[in-house]
Image (cartoon, rainbow, N blue to C red):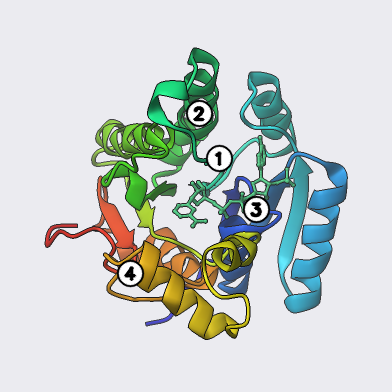
Amino acid sequence: MQIDLSGRTALVTGSTSGIGYAIASTLAGAGATVVVNGRSPASVDAAVERLLAERPRASVRGVDADVTQSDGVDRMLEAVPAVDILVNNLGIFGAKPALEITDDDWQRYFDTNVLSAVRLIRSYLPGMIEAGWGRVIDIASDSAVVIPAEMIHYGVSKTALLAVSRGFAKAAAGTGVTVNSVIAGPTHTGGVEDFVYELVDRELPWNEAQREFMRLHRPQSLLQRLIEPEEIANMVAYLASPLASATTGGALRVDGGYVDSILP
Ligand SMILES: NC(=O)c1ccc[n+]([C@@H]2O[C@H](COP(=O)([O-])OP(=O)(O)OC[C@H]3O[C@@H](n4cnc5c(N)ncnc54)[C@H](OP(=O)(O)O)[C@@H]3O)[C@@H](O)[C@H]2O)c1
């Protein structure tokens, strides 16, 4: 199978680092013109520079805009009025005991992890429908399905995001536009190594350390290691491609088998 995204424009929110950067890089590698997004000009410029260094032939541009705010979405729409592929990757997470999560915390998680995706889908979906082709991919989490006791606000926001994907897939029914979510599992992103070494023997080399971490703290994982961001990006690239034309309204797992379920 050849994944060819040439001629398509893709926006990946929150893509100056982590999973978002890997998605941006993979889509660019498949030929898409990619819009890299973050909040500051400095982080966006650095990511664009990094991507071009890794893929000199890539077509990439950066837009600094805080897309969790409506004026940030306006700024994005002004810079990029239409896209063929929208990847709502941006999301925040953090641990807090359930009874200590305040109204403000709940609101912030909803605004960042759910409403920002809804606003962008509402902005870009009509153009995709009019064009008769488009892809929306929302990055959810195993926490959407296995609500973590230590971050129910995060889990609930990702459950809502699954519903958002399913709902907008219905709004796009029969149009050639697909809307799906990807359930990402525990992933090797920035900061995760420090986190792992807080919980396992600091003397262990990284590969052993991450396996020990998974064995002790994420025993449900069938992969028994962290997922690399590129492994999530590969699923996104497939979903973004014409090859995935019959997959819509779905939640596709790249969770290393973390969610203990036969059904996706
Ligand atoms: N990491 C995991 O193990 C894991 C597991 C399951 C699901 N996920 C999901 O995968 C997605 C990406 O996770 P990640 O770990 O890669 O995240 P991350 O490393 O925290 O990603 C940070 C990215 O988000 C950008 N960002 C943050 N707030 C922003 C805002 N308001 N507007 C625009 N950009 C913003 C940052 O850009 P600047 O700093 O340049 O602004 C940076 O590019 C999230 O939805 C997360 O819930 C992650």
| Distance in Å between CA atoms under marks 2 and 1 | 7 Å
Q: Is residue 201 left or right of residue 56?
A: left
- The kind of secondary structure element at disc 3 is loop
Q: Is residue 17 left or right of residue 92?
A: right
Mark whose residue sits in front, 3 or 1: 1
Q: Are marks 2 and 1 in contact (CB under 8 Å)?
A: yes
* Residue in the picture at 34% in, 43% down: 148
Q: Quadrant of the C terminus?
A: bottom left
* Residue in the picture at 34% in, 63% down: 255
Residue under label 2: 109
Question: Picture coordinates of residue 84 (x, y %)?
Answer: 52, 49
Amino acid type at circle 3 is: Ser
| Distance in Å between CA atoms under marks 3 and 4 | 22 Å
Residue under label 1: 92
Give the vertical position of 143 relative to 102 (above or below).
below
Q: Are marks 3 and 1 in contact (CB under 8 Å)?
A: no
- The kind of secondary structure element at disc 2 is helix
Amino acid type at circle 2 is: Tyr
Q: Residue furthest left?
A: 262
Give the vertical position of 187 relative to 144 (above or below).
below
The answer to whether the beta carbon of the residue marked 1 is less than 8 Å from any atom of ligand 1 is yes
Residue under label 4: 256
Residue under label 3: 15
| Distance in Å between CA atoms under marks 1 and 4 | 21 Å
Amino acid type at circle 1 is: Ile
Q: Residues within 10 Å of mark 1 (few under 14, many from 20)?
A: few
Q: Nearer the viewer, residue 90 or 52?
A: 90
